[in-house]
Amino acid sequence: MSGDQQNDFMMNITNWLNKIRANKSVLLISIMMFCAIKARCQLDSKINPYLLNNQWTAKWITCPNISLKDYAVLDFRKTFQLSKKPERFIIHVSGDNRYKLFVNGNEVCNGPARGDLAHWRYETIDIADKLVAGKNVLTAVVWNLGEFIPAAQITNKTAFILQGDSALESVVNTDDSWKVYKNEAYKSPEKLALRTVVGQGELVYGPKYPYGWETVNYDDEAWTSPRILGPGLPYGKSPGWDWMLVPRNIPFMEHQFQRINTIVRTENVQVDHKFLLGNVPVPIPAHQKVTILLDQQSLTTAYPEVIVSGGKNAVITIGYAEALTDDKGEKGNRNDISGRTLSSDFYDVFTPDGGQNRHFETLWFRTFRYLELTVTTNDDPLIIQDIGAYFTAYPFHENAYFKSNDSTLSKIWDIGWHTARLCAGETYYDCPYYEQYQYIADTRIQGLISLSVSGDDRLMRNAIQQFQQSILPIGLTQSRYPSSQPQIIPPFSLFWISMVHDYWMYRDDPEFIKEQINGIRSVLGWYQQHISSNGMLGPMDWWNFVDWSFGPYNMEKPIGGVPEGAINGNSSILTLQYAYTLQQAAALLESTGDQNQARQYRVLAVSLIQKTKALCWNQQKGLIADSPEQDTYSQHANIMAVLAGMFNSAEEKGLMNKVLHEPDLTQTTLYFKFYLVQAMNKAGLGDEYLDQLQPWKDMIKLGLTTFAETPEPTRSDCHAWSASPNYDLLATVCGITPGSPGFKTVIIAPHLGRLKFIEAKMPHPNGDILVSLKRKDDNGLEGNVLLPQGLSGIFIWKGKQVQLHSGRQSIAL
């Protein structure tokens, strides 16, 4: 077990013990065992090479006499004997759509990590610690939401597979010795809700639930033998397939119990605050309807759980919302509750069977700040024993920090990191509440935050690979992937290439870069076919989204966020983004030895820039117009002109001053401010960065605990691209960026603006970079820089340069 895994293991044991102290429920304690073994599920176990190259002995199994495409929740069991407790027992497991695996009643993992049918992930775990001499049982719940499936979930048909790593573990291979039961407690929703992109809520009818089915001594005599679908097939080892199996390439998600913090209000029931601590149950009489509104006080992504006793045939509805709304549907200050209600189209419904300590936990996580329980009892009174949630997210560690004399920046940092965390699971998410899609535009920014704040590059690598796997025959990536509903946003395909370039600058990984080259050529080739006779990009198909400041999405005519010229041709923004990306691609190709193609890309980029300037530059205004008609002007066009290198350094500075202070330009929203800051840095205006943070300060004043998709009114309260300050505070204010590909050298060029001092730590592949600086007089600077072993670079301050070396060094300028 690695050092990080040991730390995770000890942290989870601590959380488990704290949970036991807080709540004596035997059922809760058994559920919390999952936390203690999670790290063991992430062992870097060797996969038997045979399984990577040959057909598996294990078979995909399902339930007989059901439609494999429709809504279904299936329970599987395998009972087996061991002569002694094993020291090693490695298995490989997967399911479609999703599964949870239990060993002797304890949940040990869930999955599969989202992918596509040609790259269907399986999890590899060592379950030896959970096995005993004698009788053991493996159980799994597998579910398919049918027509209510999350749009980010690709699926084939409802099925489960488990393969032992060697002869020792082959006793548990899925075959006709397993048993299966269609869990009739789960009911398909009667109709689609208003919002279905993340899937539907669950309707669970307790009287039909097979309680205890995960445990060793459960009687499964009435269960049936499974239907065999076919063997497991590793990637590329068959001429055709249902699923092409590939190993999971990311860690398991964090899974940590959290209490809900506050009771907002109740109707027809008295609730002691100690109820939220698990100490005082809430009794509800027969024939009563009550409502309990709870506030987590910070947005979360978690599996909610409710434990009840009695209440046969009561109806418990659990609703979720990012914010309360008034009678006009407006959110306002997220902390305000007066005159506001939880108006959610997303909820779960649980009907108890009347038994004791019945536990309800959702199959997939929910996103909420506010959670509302509505309980309607029948003839039997109900007791709510406890309520809580299991936080889930990609297990990023906050290995960076930023400090300054401005306390507001600390709030922005903390909220930004919370935003980034909630927007990262098995893939990056644009937003956890509404879509849970891995969009390229959000993901590029998220990847840079991951590298800068955590240093963990695995989810970024996974995203880059998945976008390449999404490339369509026309040559473009899909805009979001994995996805059961293809969508094409051509500018996002260019930003995928930018994302590869980002990774190349931060990681020395030439083989991985080479794997992306064919995809890069494909995307750029599609664009080259769209160059018109005037040298700019001509009419463009699909959705050429740039920024929401160009107008909202219209369901009758999907032109939301599309600038002048994007549809009919001659968009300066799109043409210059293409040129900007060609330059990045040229650098990548040069690194792989393809000097000829790199040279062609650079020549084409120069031509695009020159033609765009000739047609769109307005000398009188001193600005690049959005199109040759010169009817509209935006910050975006001029940002891309600077990033593409249209002007010399002096001209860039003058242009960006206009961009920052000309109110008649179409303004960037939260998303495209990331590129505004990059252009500011290139033009030497990094000291004005702090002035760009007012929208983030406004969100804090409105009580948001994560950063929103757009300024008010906003749809999503948590959106990945709005976490960009966590990158910018390190890359712009502290000025820490790679000085050469692979982060083999560093450039530290701070822009303190009005700040008096800054302190920061940022992870590097060789160790941590630490910076501590304070102003000296008006233009001076002093402090210390610490670089890890093997890293050197340059420190830049107001035109002065200092060579940096490994170790600690003083700065006095």
Image: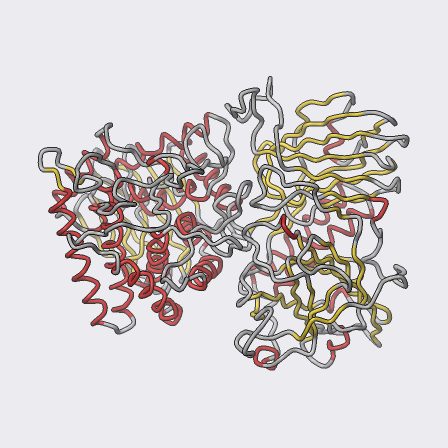
Quadrant in which the N terminus is drawn: bottom right
Quadrant assignment, res 390: top right
Going by the image, does 545 lie left or right of 650?
right
* Residue 648 % position (x, y): 12, 48
Whether residue 681 is visible to the viewer of this picture, yes or no, is no
Residue at the image position 48 percent from the left and 57 percent from the top:
459
Going by the image, does 546 lie left or right of 52?
left
Asked if 263 appears above or below 782 in the picture, the reply is above
- Residue that protrudes farthest toward the top in the picture: 339
* Residue 531 % position (x, y): 22, 56
Quadrant in which the C terminus is drawn: top left
Quadrant assignment, res 710: top left
* Residue 802 % position (x, y): 21, 53
Q: Nearer the viewer, residue 469 or 770?
A: 469
Residue at the image position 86 percent from the left and 30 percent from the top:
378
Q: Nearer the viewer, residue 196 or 682?
A: 196
Asked if 322 appears above or below 182 in the picture, the reply is above
Q: How many marks?
A: 0
Whether residue 479 is visible to the viewer of this picture, yes or no, is yes
Q: Nearer the viewer, residue 606 or 26?
A: 606
Going by the image, does 655 lie left or right of 467?
left
Quadrant assignment, res 40: bottom right
